[in-house]
Amino acid sequence: MSGFCGCEILEAKLHDEKEDGQRFLVYEIKALRPDGQILKLEMHARTGALLKVKRKGFAH
């Protein structure tokens, strides 16, 4: 599956978060970039706001 930034989506999960007494849903998405780098993204499920991005090395 291709998606965000031309990446291949490897895995997607939906989970609850709680911050400042508020509960909301977050998508956790693991994606493989065309250059081999793996991204781990967290997005607010209702707004689509990008909350966090983690990058892991490059596959050569």
Image: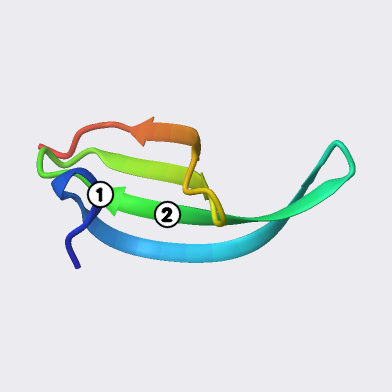
Which amino acid does the dot numbered 1 rest on? Phe
| Tag shown at residue 58 | none
What's the colour scheme?
A: rainbow
Residue 11 x %, y %: 38, 64
Residue 57 as seen in the image, left or right of residue 49 = left
Among the two numbered marks 2 and 1 on one chain, the one whose residue lies closer to the N terminus = 1
Q: Secondary structure at mark 2?
A: strand
The answer to the question of whether label 2 and label 1 lie on touching residues, with beta carbons closer than 8 A, is yes
Whole-percent x and y of residue 7?
19, 50
User: Is 60 left, or right, of 15 in this rendering?
Assistant: left
Q: Name the element at disc 1.
A: helix
Residue lying at 57% horizontally and 56% vertically, measured from the top left: 46
Quadrant assignment for the C terminus: top left
Q: Residue furthest right?
A: 21
Q: Is residue 43 above or below residue 37?
A: below
Residue for badge 2: 29
Locate the N terminus and report the quarter of the image it occupies. bottom left
- Distance of mark 2 from mark 1, alpha carbons? 10 Å
Q: Residue at x 55, y 56 (%)?
A: 45
Which numbered mark, 2 or 1, is in the foreground of this view? 1
Amino acid type of disc 2? Ile
Residue 13 placement, left or right of 39: right
Q: Residues within 10 Å of mark 1 (few under 14, many from 20)?
A: few
Label 2 crowding class (10 Å Cα cut-off): few <14, some 14-19, many 20+?
some
Which residue occupies 44% across, 34% down? 53
**Residue 47: image location, x then y, percent:** 53, 48
Q: Nearer the viewer, residue 38 or 50?
A: 50
Q: Is residue 9 above or below residue 44?
A: below
Q: Quadrant of residue 12?
A: bottom left
Q: Quadrant of residue 40?
A: top left
Q: Which residue is mark 1?
A: 4
